[in-house]
Image (spheres, rainbow, N blue to C red):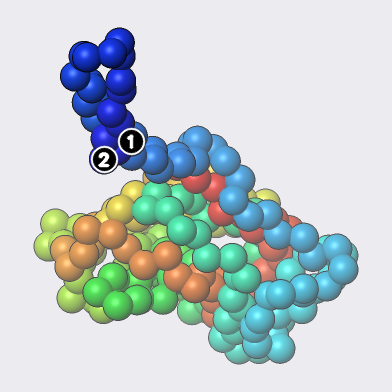
Amino acid sequence: MVVILLTGCAGSAPQKVTLHPSKPTPTEVPAGTVLYQSDWSKGLGDWQGDSGWQVSDASLKTDANGMYTITSPYTPQLENYVVEVHLKILKIPQSGGGIEVIADPAKQKSGYQAGLINLLAPDALHTFAVHPEALVLFVPSSSSEANTASQYHDFEPGYNWITYRVEVKKSWVGLYINNQLVSYGSSADTSQLSVGPIHLYSIKIEVQVDSFRIVSV
């Protein structure tokens, strides 16, 4: 608060004017703003991960010999954001493979996993109990709300390019594949989920990723 005394003509009492400085308005990021875009044209750059992730032809690729994690160099600072990955599964040599986007838990904030699991080898027999699944899980697992704790859905990803979109809105996570919502969930523990670090995690499959970006919602 600032007080200013204004003087007028001789003999008149000074007038007191009180100024209330306005509070700064937080800067809002418009929805759809690209916050981060990968560029592997010159190698991994600041990405950090297991040796199973390599760069080839400006894309990330894995071999199918193990379970490999690689970490994005960018951590969003917004409550609402999207992780968008353009990928293609190249080979599933044995059943049980998968690919996930993972955000580590932070202090008083749950982490999450969103991805595809139980991918089947081409010669595997499909039974009623065994199918590839899309899922959203929370870390710790006890943080899932009761009505969204088992969001597993059958999903056949095939071997074509797909857009894999993980949308985070405060405590809610939705997994979209080619703009179709295939799984979702909410955390019962926190009003806002952790923003990472964010990882890609491959499980015994060969996969190619040619784009990874984070966008505001």
Q: Against 105, is 133 above or below?
A: above
Q: Against 11, is 151 above or below?
A: below
Which of the 4 image quadrants contains residue 71? bottom right
Quadrant including the C terminus: top left
User: Can you identify the residue that label 2 sits on?
Assistant: 1
Give me the residue at 69% from left, 85% from top: 52
Q: Is residue 131 left or right of residue 146?
A: right
The amino acid marked with disc number 1 is Pro
Circle nearer the N terminus (1, 2): 2
Q: Against 184, is 29 above or below?
A: above
User: Can you identify the residue that label 1 sits on?
Assistant: 21
Give me the residue at 63% from left, 55% from top: 36
Residue 193 image point, x, y percent: 32, 63
Quadrant including the N terminus: top left
Give me the residue at 59% from left, 65% from top: 74
Q: Count neighbours of disc 1 (C-alpha within 10 A) and say few if under 14, some if 14 to 19, many if 20 or more.
A: few
Residue 99 image point, x, y percent: 53, 70
Pointers 1 and 2 in contact (CB under 8 A)? yes
Q: Residue furthest top?
A: 9
Give me the residue at 30% from left, 10% from top: 9
Secondary structure beneath label 1: loop
Dot label at residue 53: none
Foreground residue among 44 and 91: 44
The reply to whether residue 117 is in sight is: no
Residue 211 image point, x, y percent: 69, 56
Foreground residue among 184 and 40: 40
